[in-house]
């Protein structure tokens, strides 16, 4: 067989799992600068499944597609360190303010440039937890989808056999290629960086990261084309601008309320009627119960 | 006027609890809007399914009874929903935030170009003014959900696109019979007219193992957990009572399970399940690391213990030093008194 062209959709996300005290600014908004930007965890599980398919199907390639600011090229490099062949950064102000539907639309337009056999992504990203982009990309491209994949059990150039992890059990399905697969966090962890690949790709850069690069650097990159991370703006994809960003997003955020961060300090409640009633009232008023 | 639709999941002839919870919420909102509540059930062998949903106030039940619709696969269920929604034009559509709803919802919303908000914790009706155009929209669905790892709570609206779609996790909304003798109308869906037989059945389910477990600690928003300090199997009944009143589940430490107070399925900790409820009430649990490893990410913890130095207190937001046989009845009493 000729091998499969695999594209992994990945996202750079703020690490919402390790939120510290400085995560909120004085004005009550989220302080993104204080949160480390990481490779969305389930997208790493997705990368591992992609690399395993590549390992067992000679001639296959794995590329990352990510949408985000120039800085998001970091996760493309990270994926290259772990075994990906390269990546594409989709970056433009026109994409700002996208909800899941507008994001899926932009990604699907970029994917049309790539004609992949398999599109694999994490089930969901930790900054939104919506799990919508995978299925929406599949719908936009008219492809079947297999969500909650835990392991690709078999794969040839026509069909995949996949075990899915559902809330209360498992399901094994077969799916024709091309298809979109979303990978569950219970799947195998991603392999670590490979030292040789780190040496090879550590200077790989996307165009917007090169703006301040010196001439020596640019000449090195020009001699070694594998160090160029392809960057696409809105002009590099075929799309209707109305369907991008804010205007392409049916959902609007009406209000945002910050959940107040409190140091864990236990309140001591006496075992008497008044104290217990006050505690219950407090829990009802802050919507913990009721 | 355009109705409120609920997509109901069915397994072995029984409508899922999360769907009945959504019907309960859907009934409230439909009545508020003065519109009908309509349910959709797709599967095979759906003969008497209306008996399960009508008591929840369903005015119209859409039934798609076809062997090819069970077990659930994405594409045919999407096709039926998308085509039905194009014809019926619901203003609101709900699904469970389950393996099925979270697979189906985004696909349907993409096909209809309608907004979908995942994992809502609250749904209300209200008005919205667009900050830029100053246009005011009346009676929109407020889709309220935590985001950013639970650090913010966002209210989302879909001003223009219909249906306004939302998914909700099991156990978040209350399930309540509307009227045991409520009668609705059954409409049978002509499945062949809606599905595209050439492309909708390309995914084949070759193996399926679904546990029937009724205890789903991981999904419970509130957990009342007991330890060895509860003292007996009989005393655990008090915990069940509190869990029932609050809409939660009962969990246990290994010591309580080993002592035979509670079944193993409810064990929380290193050798049991790990849970992250929004409220964890630890009763008579000392708080060994083997247990706390399975509950330390709970959003809020109440510890009830006779020992004021119990290690569990380090994890607690509220520490009650006292006899749980005294404290729990008071909590039940004051919850009933103060909740609406």
Image (cartoon, coloured by chain):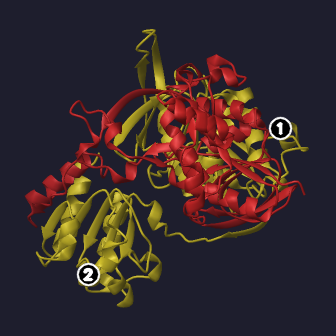
- Going by the image, does A214 lie left or right of B228? right
**Which chain is represented by red in the image?**
A
Residue B257 visible = yes
- Going by the image, does B340 lie left or right of B257? left
Instruction: Identify the element where label 2 is drawn.
Output: helix
Q: Of residues A67 and A79, which is closer to you in this image?
A: A79
Mark carried by residue B194: 1
Q: Give how far across and how far down residue A223 sits, in percent.
A: 66, 38
Q: Give how far across and how far down residue A70 sits, in percent.
A: 51, 33
Question: Toward which corner of the image does residue A134 lie, by quadrant?
Answer: top right
Check disc 2 and report the residue beneath it. B230
Q: Are marks 1 and 2 on the same chain?
A: yes
- Residue at mark 1 to residue at mark 2: CA–CA distance: 56 Å
Residue found 11% across the figure and 62% down from its top: A269
- Quarter of the rendering occupied by the C terminus of chain B: top left
Q: Colour of chain B?
A: yellow
Q: Of residues B165 and A88, which is closer to you in this image?
A: A88
Of the residues under marks 1 and 2, which one precedes in the sequence? 1
Residue B5 visible = no
């Amino acid at each position: 067989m000729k091998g499969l062209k695999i594209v992994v959709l990945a996202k750079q996300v703020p690490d919402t799992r390790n939120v510290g005290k400085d995560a909120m600014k004085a004005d009550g908004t989220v302080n993104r600068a204080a949160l480390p930007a990481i490779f969305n965890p389930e997208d790493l599980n997705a990368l591992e499944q992609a690399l395993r398919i590549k390992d067992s199907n000679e001639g296959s390639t794995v590329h990352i597609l990510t949408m985000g600011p120039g800085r998001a090229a970091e996760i493309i490099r990270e994926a290259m360190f772990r075994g990906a062949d390269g990546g594409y950064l989709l970056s433009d102000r026109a994409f700002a303010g996208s909800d899941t539907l507008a994001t899926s639309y932009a990604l699907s337009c970029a994917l049309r440039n790539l004609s992949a056999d398999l599109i694999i992504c994490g089930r969901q990203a930790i900054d939104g937890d919506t799990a919508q982009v995978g299925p929406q990309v599949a719908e936009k491209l008219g492809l079947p989808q297999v969500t909650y994949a835990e392991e690709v059990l078999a794969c040839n150039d026509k069909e995949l056999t996949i075990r899915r992890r559902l809330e209360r059990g498992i399901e094994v399905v077969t799916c024709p290629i091309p298809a979109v697969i979303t990978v569950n966090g219970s799947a195998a962890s991603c392999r670590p960086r490979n030292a040789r690949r780190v040496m090879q790709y550590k200077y790989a850069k996307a165009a917007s990261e090169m703006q301040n690069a010196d001439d020596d650097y640019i000449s090195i990159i020009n001699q070694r084309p594998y160090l160029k991370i392809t960057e696409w703006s809105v002009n590099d994809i075929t799309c209707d601008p109305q369907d991008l960003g804010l205007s392409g997003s049916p959902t609007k955020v009406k209000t945002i309320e910050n959940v107040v961060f409190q140091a864990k300090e236990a309140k001591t409640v006496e075992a008497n009627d008044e104290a217990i009633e006050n505690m219950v009232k407090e829990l009802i008023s802050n919507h913990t119960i009721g | 006027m355009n109705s409120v639709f609920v997509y109901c999941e069915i397994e072995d002839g029984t409508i899922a609890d999360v769907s009945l919870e959504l019907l309960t919420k859907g009934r409230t909102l439909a009545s508020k809007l003065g519109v009908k509540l309509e349910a959709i059930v797709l599967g095979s062998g759906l003969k008497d399914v209306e008996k399960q949903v009508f008591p929840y106030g369903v005015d119209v039940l859409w039934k798609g009874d076809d062997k090819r619709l069970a077990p659930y696969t994405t594409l045919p269920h999407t096709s039926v929903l998308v085509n039905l929604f194009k014809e019926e034009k619901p203003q609101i559509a709900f699904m469970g935030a389950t393996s099925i709803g979270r697979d189906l919802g985004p696909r349907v919303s993409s096909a209809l170009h309608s907004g979908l908000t995942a994992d809502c914790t609250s749904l209300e009706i209200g008005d919205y003014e667009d900050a830029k155009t100053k246009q005011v929209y009346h009676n929109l669905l407020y889709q309220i959900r935590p985001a950013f790892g639970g650090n913010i709570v966002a209210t989302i609206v879909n001003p223009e696109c219909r249906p306004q779609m939302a998914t909700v996790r099991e156990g978040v909304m209350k399930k309540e019979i509307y009227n045991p003798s409520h009668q609705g109308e059954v409409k049978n869906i002509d499945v062949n007219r809606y599905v595209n037989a050439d492309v909708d059945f390309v995914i084949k389910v070759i193996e399926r193992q679904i546990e029937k477990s009724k205890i789903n600690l991981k999904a419970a928003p509130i957990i009342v957990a007991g330890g060895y300090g509860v003292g007996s199997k009989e005393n655990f009944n008090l915990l069940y009572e509190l869990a029932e009143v609050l809409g939660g589940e009962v969990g246990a430490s290994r010591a309580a399970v080993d002592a035979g107070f509670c079944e193993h399925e409810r064990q929380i900790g290193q050798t049991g399940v790990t849970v992250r409820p929004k409220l964890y009430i630890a009763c008579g649990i000392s708080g060994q690391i083997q247990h706390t490893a399975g509950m330390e990410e709970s959003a809020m913890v109440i510890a009830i213990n006779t020992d004021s130095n119990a290690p569990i207190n380090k994890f607690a937001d509220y520490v009650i030093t006292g006899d749980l046989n005294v404290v729990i009845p008071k909590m039940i009493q004051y919850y009933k008194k103060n909740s609406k």
